[in-house]
Image: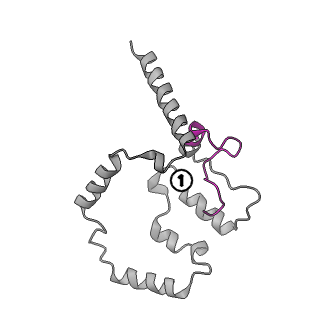
Amino acid sequence: MLVGSYPFEDPEDPRNFRKTISRILGVQYSIPDYVRVSSDCRRLLSQIFVADPSKRITIPEIKHHPWFLKNLPREISEREKANYKDADAAEPAQAVDEIMRIVEEAKTPGDMSKVVDPALLAEMAELESDEEEADADDTY
């Protein structure tokens, strides 16, 4: 949303799913040259796009980052302060059973044709076929 493209796409080959996955795993993101992004924003992105989740910036830290706070409407910042005061840190935001239900629902395949570009579906199917062939070649 910030720059109008996905951060891990290869600008030269945006439909290459394998390159995208490789760039995600290698934390290789790019900001197009034609997009002006402040140094505060670049610093925040560098703290978000970190491979090790334990070293990644947290949501509360993001909410206190100078770039996030810049030009933030007062009513939003006041609401956030009230939410922090009212939140009980010992109580989880979601119950474990609710989280497990969501995870199980996410495992259920849906009708991807309604949400994904058919060309991307075909490319994904081809990748799966290539992987199956590679797995078959590795079988002794």
For residue 73, above or below residue 106: below
Image point (65%, 69%), residue name: 40
Image point (50%, 25%), residue name: 130
User: Quarter of the image containing the N terminus?
Assistant: bottom right
| Residue found at the very far right of the displayed protein | 34
Residue 92 lies, in percent from the top left, at: 28, 68
Q: List the residue tagged with mark 1.
A: 50
Residue 86 lies, in percent from the top left, at: 33, 83
Image point (64%, 66%), residue name: 41
User: Quarter of the image containing the C terminus?
Assistant: top left
Q: How many marks?
A: 1
| Residue found at the very far left of the displayed protein | 97
Which is nearer the eye, 104 or 67?
104
In the picture, measured across the screen, residue 39 lies left or right of residue 130, that is right
In the picture, measured across the screen, residue 49 lies left or right of residue 99, that is right
In the picture, measured across the screen, residue 10 lies left or right of residue 68, that is right
Which is nearer the eye, 101 or 74?
101
- The amino acid pointed to by label 1 is Val
Magenta stretch: residue 123 in it? Answer: no
- Which secondary structure dominates the residues rendered in magenta? loop
Residue 26 lies, in percent from the top left, at: 57, 43
For residue 4, above or below residue 116: below
Dot 1: element:
loop
**What is the crowding at mark 1: few (fewer than 14 residues within 10 Å), some, or many (at least 20)?**
some
| Residue found at the very far top of the displayed protein | 140
Residue 14 lies, in percent from the top left, at: 65, 44
Q: Which residues are magenta?
A: 1-22
Image point (47%, 31%), residue name: 128
Which is nearer the eye, 29 or 55?
29
Magenta stretch: residue 17 in it? Answer: yes
